[in-house]
Amino acid sequence: MKYGLVLILIIIGILTLLRLRGIYLKKKIYNTTEMKNQDFLNQIRLILGFSYIFLGIGILFNYLIYFMMWILDPLPDRVAFFLINKIVEIQNSLNLDFLTPDSLNLINLIFNFLSFLFFFELLLSVWYMLHSYKLINNPKVAFLGIISGLIGCILFGFTAFMPYFL
């Protein structure tokens, strides 16, 4: 899972930089006014391309995972974990045996996987929003992806999946 994410992030970064190179060469060849209006988008693409490559290399060598866990720790997340803990407290007070430690471990792994999926959806939605400006007929889809990624990361945690990458 870790190496797949690293590969996808580095490929997205390289494709972003290659697209920027193609836009720059097209601007240089044709020198149209339409291309002059895209200078701000070109700067964003340059920053985004290098940041995706930096994310991929940082996750590969684990230094970015430690940094992101330290930075993202104060964010309000793991609401679903809080709800599970309340259910376990109620279960312990009523002496019901429907949640065993094995099932709690399975629920924890499922929540960590969902945390990874929503974090990845957030990254891909930002990339799609910046690169598909001609393909997006309705940008609400990209905004819904960003919003659902944020809500999912708040529910399941921004950093819940990161210890499994170490």
Image (cartoon, rainbow, N blue to C red):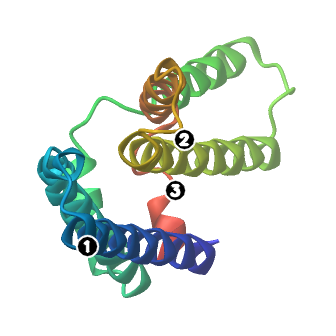
On the image, the x and y values in percent for residue 166 come to 46, 77
Give the quarter of the image for residue 7: bottom right
Q: Is residue 101 above or below residue 11?
A: above
Q: Is residue 17 above or below residue 30?
A: below
Q: Is residue 163 left or right of residue 57?
A: right
Q: For the residue labelled by badge 1, is the local secondary structure a helix, a strand or a loop? A: helix
Q: Residue at x 29, y 58 (%)?
A: 69
> Mark 3 against mark 1, which lies toward the viewer?
1
Foreground residue among 59 and 143: 143
Whichever of callouts 1 and 2 sits on the residue coming sooner in the sequence is 1
Q: Which residue is mark 2?
A: 118
Q: Which residue is mark 1?
A: 29
Q: Which residue is mark 3?
A: 161
Foreground residue among 14 and 6: 14
Disc 3 marks which amino acid?
Answer: Phe
Q: CA distance from mark 3 to mark 1?
A: 46 Å
